Image (tube, rainbow, N blue to C red):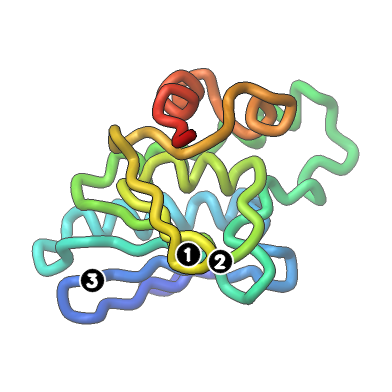
Amino acid sequence: MALANVLVERHGRVARVTVNRPDKLNALNVATRNDIVAAFEELARDDEVRVVVVTGAGEKAFVAGADINEFAGTTAVGQRAVMRGSRAFDAVEDCPKPVIAMINGFALGGGLHVSGGVYLRPGPNGVVRESRQPSSITASPPSPYTEAGCSSRRAPSMWASSAA
C-alpha cells in the first residue's frame, strides 16, 4: 500500500504503522488522518497480522496534534469540520487486533487521541502503561492540558484509568 504520510511495515505477525511527517512533528493533516484510516482498515483485514505498533517518525514527536496550517483562513466552525472529517482516531481504537503505541516524543492533541485507542503505551525509560480498557489512556485528572487533548467519548475512561 502506497500512502503519502504513513508507513506500514510488516515483520512476521507484527505490523508497524509510522506517522511519517517528522519535519512537521508528525502533525495530523487531512491526508495523514486518511492514511491512518486506510492503514488500519487494511491491517484489520490481514489475517497474518496479530498485533499493530503505531509510532511517529523522528526523535521529537509521536504525534504533535493537528496541523494548524490547514486552519489558516478558516473560522472556528471550519476548523472543527476539518478535524471531524476523518475517523483516524476511531480506526485505531476500533482495530480488532491489539495496538501498542510506541510514544517516542511529544503526544499532544491528536497524539493523545491516537494513543487513547491502544492497549499498551511503552514510554520513556521503558515504562509501560497498560490500559485497563482498550479505549483508555493513562492521563492526569482533568486539567486544561488533558481537556484540550481528548474527546468527550474518550475522556471519562482516560481519567478513570489514570495511574496514580
Instruction: Name the residue that disc number 3 marks.
Output: 14
In this image, 44 relative to 74: left or right?
left
Q: Quadrant of residue 84?
A: top right
Q: Quadrant of residue 102?
A: bottom left
Instruction: Name the residue that disc number 1 marks.
Output: 55
Query: At numbered mark 3, what does the secondary structure look like: helix, strand or loop?
Result: strand
Q: Amino acid at mark 2?
A: Asn
Q: Quadrant of residue 100?
A: bottom left
Name the residue at 62% across, 76% down: 58
Name the residue at 34% across, 77% down: 9
Q: Of callouts 2 and 1, which one flags the residue occurring earlier in the amino acid sequence?
A: 1
Quarter of the picture containing the N terminus is bottom left
Q: Residues within 10 Å of mark 1 (few under 14, many from 20)?
A: many
Image location (x, y in percent) of residue 38: 38, 55
Q: Are marks 2 and 3 in contact (CB under 8 Å)?
A: no
Instruction: Name the residue that disc number 2 marks.
Output: 104
Q: Residues within 10 Å of mark 3 (few under 14, many from 20)?
A: some
Q: Of callouts 1 and 3, which one flags the residue occurring earlier in the amino acid sequence?
A: 3
Residue projecting furthest to the left: 47
Residue projecting furthest to the bottom: 11
Image location (x, y in percent) of residue 86: 51, 39
Q: Amino acid at mark 3?
A: Val
Name the residue at 52% across, 18% down: 152
Image location (x, y in percent) of residue 108: 66, 46
